[in-house]
Image: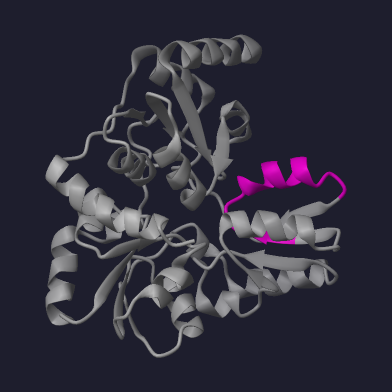
Amino acid sequence: MLNSLSEEILRLKKERNAIILAHNYQIPEVQDAADIVGDSYSLSRHAAETDSEVIVFCGVHFMAESAKILSPDKTVLLPVRDAGCPMADMVTASGLRKMKARHPDAAVVCYVNSSAEVKAESDICCTSSNALKVVESLENKQVIFIPDKNLGSYIASKVRGKEIILWEGFCITHKRVKVEEVQKIRQLHPDAKILMHPECEPEVLKLADFIGSTSEIIRYAGEIPEKNIIIGTEEGVLHLLKKRNPDKNFYLLSTGLICANMKKTRLEDVHNALLHMQHQIHVDEAVRIKAMKALERMLEIK
């Protein structure tokens, strides 16, 4: 059944001139069916550069929305309509406007985990892999960082000469990691390196051997000589890590590192999206133009 479904997806993909993008947190079957697997940063670039007429974005709503912002003439499909991001829902355009009014001299750096309306109110977007470069590229001495306070706090600890004003948002998945869990797994695997995502709480990050985005964690895990590695981000990355590094042992830092929204998409959903061209993403044109400027400024940073 799996093979026949995969073959049908391939047929429809060719028929629709479509490309399938999958985030690293997707289930293994969906990752294997994708043309490109990556994190928000790399997928944002591919969404902008692809010649395909249809983009099937296996991720959550804000990711597909970003693809539509950058590719307005393409059809963007989100296989599961209600695959959302709780952190993205923690910031609204109206709330951001109020904060901007309180800090008129501040630039707004918007983590891509946010809605099109919020991006439209921002000066520039960022991802976890380029957030530091984005903040450092700004001339403003004050920077409003939205919506993830943990990533913002991490960047604030790295940047000099700027005041980082944090929004009180967070990733409910990475927030679940507790100091006690890190200490326990360190005792179980004393020779292992602990790799963490900066969306984790500051007190947890202090115990990490390496802090980086999903793609940076994947790259670093393949480069280091250690055979035992503890992964402190969503468990979906284990699929690619094990494929690329069959000689290494990977352990998940916490059982709580599972994003329910990222796990909603199944192969059947990808097939149905292509078959029925369903769950198309639409963005108001006025909002799209403003949001595109923030995304384009991010994409210009190397």
What is the count of numbered marks?
0
Q: Is residue 275 left or right of residue 73?
A: right
Q: Is residue 241 magenta?
A: yes
> Measuring 46% from the left and 83% from the top, which residue is drawn there?
159
Quadrant location of the N terminus in the rendered image: top right
> Could you say which is closer to the camera, residue 117 or residue 28?
117
Colour mode of the rendering? one colour
Q: Position of residue 295 (x, y in %)?
A: 33, 54
> Measuring 67% from the left and 70% from the top, which residue is drawn there?
210
> Could you say which is closer to the camera, residue 244 or residue 296?
296
Q: Is residue 118 left or right of residue 130?
A: left
Q: Is residue 108 magenta?
A: no
> Could you say which is closer to the camera, residue 121 or residue 253?
121
Measured along the vertical axis of the image, is residue 264 above or below residue 127?
A: above
Q: Quadrant of residue 98?
A: bottom left
Q: Is residue 231 left or right of residue 133?
A: right
Residue situated furthest bottom in the rendering = 161
Q: Position of residue 219 (x, y in %)?
A: 69, 56
Measured along the vertical axis of the image, is residue 268 above or below residue 198?
A: above
> Measuring 27% from the left and 30% from the top, which residue is drawn there?
73
Q: Is residue 44 visible?
A: yes
Q: Is residue 47 left or right of residue 27?
A: left
Q: Quadrant of residue 146?
A: bottom left
> Measuring 40% from the left and 65% from the top, which residue is drawn there?
170
Q: Position of residue 241 (x, y in %)?
A: 72, 47
Measured along the vertical axis of the image, is residue 65 above or below residue 266?
A: below
Q: Which residues are magenta?
A: 230-247
Q: Position of residue 186 (x, y in %)?
A: 76, 71
Q: Is residue 256 visible?
A: no
